[in-house]
């Protein structure tokens, strides 16, 4: 999993929902080359998170494909949002040669896509609702577990169009 080192100031993101690529979020951060952490079963489910190779700041998030979506009946209350910010991830030095060689790190582990009335959340295997704390940057929420690892990414205030695109 990706360890969060610190939180930077929130940055407005360009968020797109589409039939072919369900969710694309771009923060426009490009200080160095972008490296990608990918997870899912890598066949039917795949998401990638782009990070700046120089400092680990999140640059982009793309939900490429997912095998199913869980509809949540209850309303989603984000009472656990503790701060505002954009995550900066730990990029261990021992991975640097691997990163520069192919720019992708694959972490084969499935994730869950949960959809509420106006909120979608991608939950990673380490997600535990009793231990998650959220930071927010615009419409995007980042869940962090008690080990300071990324455990969820969500988008709030979904429009009717965005909901339809996710359900299709």
Image (spheres, rainbow, N blue to C red):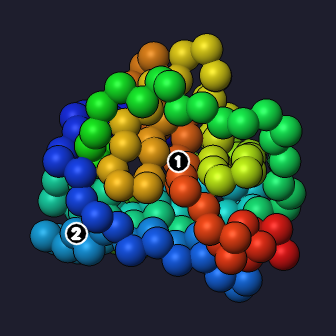
Residue 38, x across and y down, in percent: 55, 59
From this view, report whether residue 30 is shown above or below residue 52: below
Q: In which quarter of the image is residue 50?
A: bottom left
Q: Which mark is residue 29?
A: 2
**C-beta proximity under 8 Å, tags 2 and 1:** no
Q: Which of marks 2 and 1 is nearer the N terminus?
A: 2
Query: Quick one: label 2, few (<14), some, or many (20+) residues within 10 Å?
Result: some
Question: Taking 60 as reference, is 44 left or right?
Answer: right
Residue 47, x across and y down, in percent: 60, 62
Helix, strand or loop under label 2: loop
- Which residue is drawn at the image coordinates 60% and 32% (left, top)? 77
- Which residue is drawn at the image coordinates 26% and 74% (left, top)? 28
- Which residue is drawn at the image coordinates 35% and 55% (left, top)? 138
Q: Residue 153 carries which label?
A: 1
- Which of the image's four quarters has the C terminus? bottom right
Q: Quadrant of residue 84?
A: top left
Residue 30, x across and y down, in percent: 20, 73
Residue 25, x across and y down, in percent: 45, 69
- Looking at the rendered structure, the number of numbered marks drawn on it comes to 2
Does the image show residue 65? no
Helix, strand or loop under label 1: strand
Question: Taking 113 as reference, is 107 left or right?
Answer: left
From this view, report whether residue 144 is shown above or below residue 67: above
């Amino acid at each position: 999993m990706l360890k969060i080192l610190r939180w930077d100031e929130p940055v407005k993101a360009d968020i797109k929902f589409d039939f072919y690529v369900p969710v694309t979020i771009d923060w426009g951060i490009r200080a160095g080359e972008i490296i990608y952490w990918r997870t899912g079963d890598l066949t039917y489910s795949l998401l990638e998170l782009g990070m700046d190779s120089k400092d680990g700041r999140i640059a982009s998030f793309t939900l490429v494909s997912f095998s199913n979506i869980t509809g949540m009946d209850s309303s989603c209350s984000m009472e656990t949002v503790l701060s505002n910010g954009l995550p900066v991830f730990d990029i261990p030095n021992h991975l640097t040669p691997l990163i520069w060689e192919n720019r992708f790190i694959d972490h084969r582990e499935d994730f869950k896509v949960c959809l509420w009335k106006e909120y979608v959340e991608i939950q990673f295997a380490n997600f535990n609702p009793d231990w998650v704390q959220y930071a927010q940057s615009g419409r995007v929420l980042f869940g962090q577990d008690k080990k300071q690892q990324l455990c969820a990414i969500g988008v709030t205030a979904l429009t009717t169009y965005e909901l339809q695109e996710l359900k299709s």
